[in-house]
Image (spheres, grey):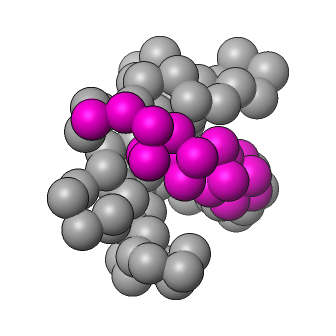
């Protein structure tokens, strides 16, 4: 099954550093915008959780329909967001 995944790195103060779409499926503009919207909406939840836990991988921090948002948080609070549908 062909799938396209969005990967976003977010720095301090919610500044996007890097964004990439990876996959073999034809790029759909609406899917990329949906992923960006979901990840942006999860930023507040992630920032609150990052200060209350010592874990670097935060699984299931937010949900949208059947999509689950997970994030890796570095020691410098750089956030690595894989696409919401890549870690279900």
Residue 41 magenta-drawn? yes
Q: Nearer the viewer, residue 20 or 39?
A: 39
Q: Nearer the viewer, residue 86 or 53?
A: 53
Residue stretch in magenta: 37-54
Q: Residue at x 24, y 68 (%)?
A: 76
Q: Nearer the viewer, residue 69 or 28?
A: 69
**With respect to residue 17, does 20 lie above or below?**
above
Residue 55: horizontal and vertical position, in percent?
27, 32
Quadrant of the rendered image containing residue 33? bottom right
Q: Residue at x 79, y 21 (%)?
A: 65
Can you name the residue that lies furthest to the front here?
A: 52
Quadrant of the rendered image containing residue 1? top left
Q: Residue at x 31, y 44 (%)?
A: 72
Residue 43 magenta-drawn? yes
Q: Residue at x 33, y 63 (%)?
A: 77
Q: Nearer the viewer, residue 38 or 58?
A: 58
Query: Is residue 76 visible to us here?
Result: yes
Give the side of residue 15 with respect to residue 82, left or right.
right
Quadrant of the rendered image containing residue 2? top left
Residue 20: horizontal and vertical position, in percent?
39, 67
Give the side of residue 58 with respect to residue 46, left or right.
left
Residue 75: horizontal and vertical position, in percent?
20, 58
């Amino acid at each position: 099954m062909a799938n396209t995944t969005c990967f976003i790195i977010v720095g301090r103060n919610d500044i996007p550093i890097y964004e990439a779409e990876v996959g073999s499926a034809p790029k759909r503009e609406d899917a990329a915008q949906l992923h960006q919207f979901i990840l942006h909406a999860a930023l507040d939840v992630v920032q609150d959780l990052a200060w209350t836990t010592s874990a670097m991988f935060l699984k299931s921090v937010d949900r949208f329909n059947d999509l689950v948002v997970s994030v890796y948080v570095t020691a410098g609070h750089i956030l690595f967001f894989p696409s919401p549908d890549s870690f279900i």
